[in-house]
Image (cartoon, rainbow, N blue to C red):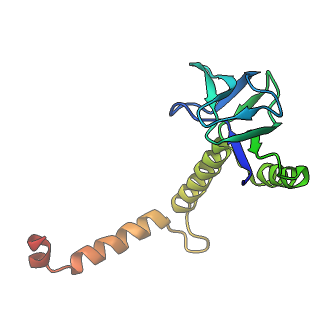
Amino acid sequence: MPIHMITMPKWGLSMEQGQVNGWLKAIGDKVAKGDEILDVETDKISSGVECAFDGILRRQIAQEGETLPVGALVAVVADAETADAEIDAGVEAFQRDFVPASAEAGSRSKTRASRQDRIATPAQGKGRNLRASALRMLKRRIERLDPHFILSL
């Protein structure tokens, strides 16, 4: 059986994080698909996180009272035969590669802002605005279009 990573769920569009209120299952407990394994509280609701897999709860990564971003690793479910070293390697890889959604959104907005800065600033050495240059180029392309072609659209 593969190793299954249980992550902090996203229960709403504005949800960015959740606080672990308590564990309903202990390490070593058998869990079935649909079993609630921990309680999570957000700024709007408090609910149980259901396990999506059958197996044994092998790791409780999140601690009671800890607040984690959406998508963060909270638990690991695997079968009894899965080696501890294999589980530890999976947890380490997940933690290393995990990027919170809020961090991704922040980097996207920074990228968007830097693009706007490049467009709004004058081109180096030419003394003209890139946005105005782009508009002039677009105007020339529109002027070259056949009006009959445009009307047929």
Query: Which image quadrant: the N terminus?
Result: bottom right
Query: Which image quadrant: the C terminus?
Result: bottom left
Residue 38 placement (x, y as % from top left): 70, 26
Which residue shows up at 76% across the image and 46% down it?
A: 78
Q: Is residue 97 above or below residue 52?
A: below
Count of numbered circles in the view: 0
The quarter holding residue 43 reads top right
Residue 135 placement (x, y as % from top left): 37, 67
Left of 142 or right of it: where is 137? right
Residue 50 placement (x, y as % from top left): 62, 31
Left of 40 or right of it: where is 22? right
Q: Is residue 150 above or below residue 33?
A: below
Residue 96 placement (x, y as % from top left): 81, 53
Which residue shows up at 36% across the image and 74% down it?
A: 137
Answer yes or no: is residue 75 visible.
Answer: no
Q: Which of 124 and 14 is in front in this view?
A: 14
Answer yes or no: is residue 48 visible.
Answer: yes
Which residue shows up at 53% across the image and 56% down it?
A: 116
Q: Nearer the viewer, residue 56 or 41?
A: 56
Which residue shows up at 55% across the image and 64% down it?
A: 122
Q: Nearer the viewer, residue 125 or 87?
A: 87
